[in-house]
Image: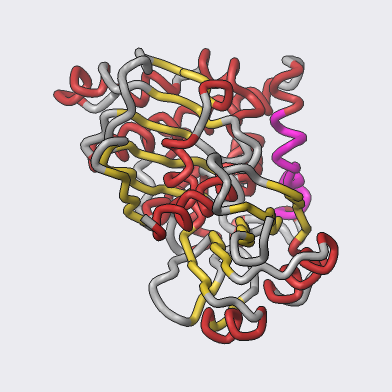
Amino acid sequence: MSTDSLALVGDIGGTNARFALVDLTAPRTELRASKSLPNAEFASLQHAIEHYLADVQAAPRRAALAVACPVGSDEIRLTNRAWSFSRNELQAALGLSELRMLNDFGAVAWAVPALADEHLVTLHGDARAPLRGPISVLGPGTGLGVALLVGDGERGWQVVETEGGHVGFAPIGDEERAIAAWLTAQHGRTSTERLLCGRGLSEIDLVLRGAAVPPAATLLPGESSLRRPALRDPAEIVAAALDGHDLAARRALARFCAVLGSVAGDCALIHGARRVMIAGGIVPRFLPFLRSSAFRERFLAKGRMATLLESVPIQVITHPHPGLLGAACALRASES
């Protein structure tokens, strides 16, 4: 693998920074020396990249980095991590001849045509038809990513990057209205991302376990903190829900799945999707639970458009590093 053919790819989320090397002259896109680094251990993205390249003893000249934020300007500011940088300054500091920046879910969308069947689980519908856009790509992780994939294998693919996770949340029923009221009190506004992410699952669980206490003025001193349950880790909630003995955890995860179904259906209608792909680090952990939840019911609960959505296949991406794969695919596409 020559220096000219070697490229760095990265997928930088709010919690972890994942990196790998790819040989752009190889017939297939394969990730090599992939590593995940915790963001909290590094002062900046440049610091994390330099650490990775020193560890793998590589000096690539080209790179594609997927980041969890908009990438339309030179100044990049991560949404869920206190990192910001100039793309031009980062390119110069790393000695790169090319640095391509992508939104993190834009990168996941680029990966979709390259995914093997073993990295896809069909949740609902018939997914045997040839892949053809528009395809909605969304999923919860540290935040909620949304992207649109258009085109096909013959004409080529294009990705439309979006910040669709930040649209306003539309609650259905008293339980979701209570959750929305709690989140709005904390943040001033409730977007879908506030619920459909790891922190969101924890806050859904918190509210359903009784966090929505009366206003402080109606309580005795110290009463609010005494009555408010502790915030649980999302992995703990998922594990407890799947174990089957924690009713509160199952209730929280069931509500999370229902809201995900509503949002996935909305995305499909907005995009005119022929297929929906769900990615992110959370959903693959509880696929049987999701399949038996109200996800499908809420996906189809779109009034007169329910019949249209019945024919839309829904698949879950289980590839361990779709963002890295997609970043590599985007670099390859720029060469053609």
Give the number of marks.
0
Range drawn in magenta: 224-238
Quarter of the image with the N terminus in it? bottom right
Left or right: where 119 falls relative to 108: right
Q: Which residue appears at 53% of the width and 52% of the height?
A: 328
Which colour assignment does the render follow? Answer: secondary structure
Residue at horizontal 54%, vertical 63%?
64
Residue 130 in magenta stretch: no
Q: Nearer the viewer, residue 188 or 166?
A: 166
* Foreground pick, 93 / 276: 93
- Which residue is outermost to the right? 55
User: In the image, residue 24 lies at what x, y percent?
Assistant: 55, 53
If the image is split into quadrants, where does the C terminus sit? Answer: bottom left
Q: Is residue 179 above or below residue 22?
A: above
Please say if 160 is above or below 111: below
Q: Quadrant of residue 78?
A: bottom right
Query: Does 297 sit above or below residue 269?
Result: above
Decide which of 270, 22 is in the foreground and name it. Answer: 22
Is the magenta region chiefly helix, strand or loop? Answer: helix
Quarter of the image for residue 59 reads bottom right
Q: Where is 197 relative to 176, above or below?
A: below
Rendered location of residue 26, percent (x, y): 57, 46
Residue 194 position within the rendered picture, expressed as x and y whole percent measured from the top left: 51, 51
Residue 77 location (% of width, % of height): 54, 74
Q: Is residue 245 visible?
A: yes
Q: Residue at x 35, y 53 (%)?
A: 167
Can residue 12 be seen at all in this image of the molecule? no
Residue beneath the point at 56% across and 41% down: 280
Q: Residue furthest left?
A: 304
Please check the rendered image and state whether residue 226 is part of the magenta-colored stretch, yes or no: yes
